[in-house]
Amino acid sequence: MENHQENLSEVKKAKEFIQGLRFQQEQLTAKELDEILGKVIANERPVHRSVAPNRTESPFVISQWLRVAAILILPLLAAVLINGFFSERNPELLSEPVEWITLENPKGRKSKVTLPDGTQVNLNYESQLKFPKVFEGATRTVELIGEAFFDVVPMDTMPFIVLTGEVETMVLGTSFNIRSFEDEGETRVSLVTGKVKVNNTGRAISQGDMFLSPGEQLRFNRNSGQMQIDSFDVETVTAWKEGVILFKDANFEEFVEQLEKWYGVDFQVYGTSAKKWRVNGRYQNEKLDDILVGLKFVYGLDSKIQGKNVIIKFE
């Protein structure tokens, strides 16, 4: 059904027909099916008798009845075989295709979404979250590119799984942050509450399952495939979801890059600063112009905002 959308209506009709058949009461062996088919074929041949048939059992009537039986039995046997093949080998082919929802944020936009199970997700800028319209099956699986904070609803029988490239993070009910931007070269899973299991699924040689406790962060290097666990500062990792932008000893390049992504703008810089940049600050829901004005007298810069363009000139 996924690979042949143009035949979707025909496949659905066939599916309804097959699912409507029930053969659980009596199931014939392969040998019995062959014997029935052999009898049907044999009895369909012209009947020759040495004695005159009676009126109720003429060769013509018997032959016609057998033809009808053959027409009915052969499709029925085929349906039994098809039903067994699909249900035993490929049960997912008889189910409805999963409808996925994709939420994508460009730079400058952050959003919050509630998943079908009630899980709350804060999605950062330049990030994409893909999840099914309805969670079905043994797990609740979502796919993430970029950064998101998850507050997962506990379900003991249905683990929550986040796929980020080669890293798979599984939880039952907890809150954690995942950062996996493609241009950063690493994936970071930071656990705030609960417990999570992480493994690198895309490697031939895996380090196995690694478990995190609150306050621990797993860092996966996408080049080497190595994973390591360290401690982390919760506010530094999760402040973004509260509308807080943090700078800790940020140089000028880091400062500009962060503001471009946070506010969705492009910087044009003229000249260079006479002082070494080491910006430390905590700004909550601040306007971009206010941040720049605050740095004007420290680093000797003039700034002007024109739509999505920010012009900075050093004195």
Image (cartoon, rainbow, N blue to C red):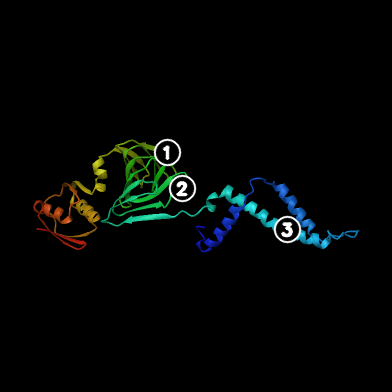
Q: Does residue 189 appear anywhere in the picture? A: no
Rendered view: 175 above or below 128? above
Residue 49 vs residue 150, the one in the foreground:
49
Rendered view: 168 above or below 45? above
Q: Amino acid at mark 1?
A: Asp
Give x and y (percent) for residue 44: 78, 59
Q: Which residue is mark 2?
A: 136
Q: Which residue is mark 1?
A: 156
Residue 199 vs residue 111, the one in the foreground:
111
Q: Which mark is residue 70?
A: 3
Give x and y (percent) for residue 151: 33, 43
Q: Badge 1 local density, few (<14 within 10 Å), some, or many (20+)? A: few
Instruction: Kindly identify the residue that appears in the image at 24 percent across and 42 percent down.
Output: 235
Where is residue 264, by image quadrant?
bottom left
Work out whether mark 2 precedes mark 1 in sequence or the reverse, and give the earlier one: 2
Q: Which mark is residue 42?
A: none
Residue 306 vs residue 228, the one in the foreground:
306
